[in-house]
Amino acid sequence: MTISDPVGDMFARIRNAQQRNHADVLIPASKFKKFVLDAMEREGFIVGYEIVQNEKDTFKNLKVILKYVHGNPVINEINRVSKPGRRIYTRFDSLPRVQNGLGVAIISTSFGILTDNEAREKKVGGEIICNIS
């Protein structure tokens, strides 16, 4: 089965797992997803991730370890902004502030996957992948 939006599927899996208070979630692996998870880990939204592969499966999976504080998930909202049907690009000086700086926007730039604060520091714009708060 092919998925038309693999990154959106990753966010849905994370959202669903946190609603059910799961400790971790398995996601089909890709380099782009690893870079997005790296940005989420740098900002403290997840504990981490590891690459796992079952003996039966030929494909690798990412085991994302979710983060909770006092039993509540750290990620309140995770919204996909740029979708396969409509890409959203922005310059560095017009990058969005998610919940007045309490949240994070993840941007795909020519320097790699960066958070909105890192993109402002490097003065580089790009495609807005998602908003996390």
Image (cartoon, helix red, strand yellow):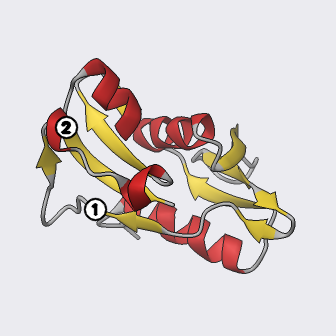
Q: Where 73 falls versus 36 (above or below)?
A: below
**SS at badge 2:** strand
Can you see residue 14?
yes
Q: Earlier in the sequence, mark 1 or mark 2?
A: 1
Counting labels gives 2
Q: Which residue is mark 1?
A: 81
Residue type at tag 1? Val
Few, some or many residues within 10 Å of mark 2 (<14, 14–19, 20+): many
Q: In the drawing, does residue 107 fall left or right of residue 110?
A: right
- Residue at left 29%, top 29%? 120
Residue 40 image point, x, y percent = 55, 44
Q: Where 118 falls versus 76 (above or below)?
A: above
Q: Residue furthest right?
A: 70
Residue 106 image point, x, y percent = 38, 45
Residue 19 image point, x, y percent = 68, 79
Q: Residue furthest bottom?
A: 20
Q: Which mark is residue 103?
A: none
Q: Which residue is mark 2?
A: 126
